[in-house]
Amino acid sequence: MENATRPGPDPQVVKQAISWALRLRNNRANLRLRTQCEHWREAHRDHELAWQRVQALQQELSSQLAAIPGAHVALENSAQGLGRRQAMKMLSGVLLAGSAAWMSRDITGWQRWTSDLATATGERRSIQLPDGTRLQLNTDSAVDLDFSPQQRLIRLVRGEILVNCGTAASVPLLVETRHGLFEGIDGRFAVRQASDCTRLSVVSGNVTIRSPHQANGLSTRVQAGESYLVRQTEAIPAPPMNMDVGAWADGLIVTRGMRLADFLEEVGRYRHGYLGCSTEIADLRLSGVFRLEDTDKLLAILPQTLPVQVRYRTRWWVSLERSA
């Protein structure tokens, strides 16, 4: 039986599969091109896997777009109006974003079913643990719990959590990620796990970083208002954030002079598909309080404060451009 957490094909292989799919889409009668594609698919197992998943994604997108009147035509017309190079880039972006989501399904879906607590994209969840600790999960997150008379452990499998420490006990409250171990002394703190590091942000109280991978074997005490980036070999102070760390627990994004591109990346965590902006407006700054329950309404507010317009190519492909 194949391991359910086996990584998918390398992103570069996925891009190659998308390139073949797009070339064949525009040259259906080219027998030589079809033969070359078949040779590429046969060259490696991951080539065929990437090809099959891209094909499956295309079929799924087609069926989903078919349910929205005019959506498929709008996508095709947008591609035709952009010119060949831009159209290839746009369609490739749609497929690449979708392919990444498709190939991660086996892993994230498996984590969602096997983890003790989990949230889907756009979902947030709050639970009180047996010791009185309040645990809140942000979008697309998963945790395992190991509570016993000898241990109080929250293992962050994916995503981001906000912890409000419960009643003080003789057994420390621990949060574990792939990069380190965090001991909550008291107060409130957020832990956000990315692929290359974990960000610890202490809202109140203090937290001790105990990373078994640090070369010097030392622990680091983090006070209220401080943030650290923790990797397998180091724990260093993090640069200041231009948004409130725990506002998402109240369904908000609160920003202070945040780059538009960074803001959209953050909002994109709460919705499916592609969300981005052109490079000429990426550095525009944004301050305010934004509600997360409806990200389309959130995006509709932006042209009121910034010289931008929101363009929907499809429900799953949204971009911001400078207003005319």
Image (spheres, rainbow, N blue to C red):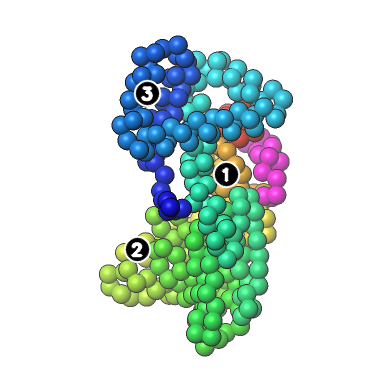
| Residue 37 image label | 3
Callout 3: 10 Å neighbours few (<14), some, many (20+)? some
Res 187 → quadrant? bottom right
From this viewpoint, is residue 162 visible?
Answer: no
Circle 3: element type: helix
- In the rendered view, tell whether residue 108 sits above or below residue 215: above
Q: Is residue 81 visible?
A: yes
Looking at the image, is mark 3 or mark 1 earlier in the sequence?
3
Instruction: Read off the residue under disc 1.
Output: 268
Is 277 situated left or right of 69 in this image? left
Start-end of magenta stretch: 291-307
| Nearest to the observer: residue 122 or residue 120 | 120
Indicate left or right for 68 with 38 as reference: right
* Residue plotted at (65% across, 72% down): 128
Q: Distance between the residues labelled 2 and 3?
A: 41 Å
- What type is the residue that disc 3 sits on? Cys
Residue 249, relative to residue 260: is it above or below?
below
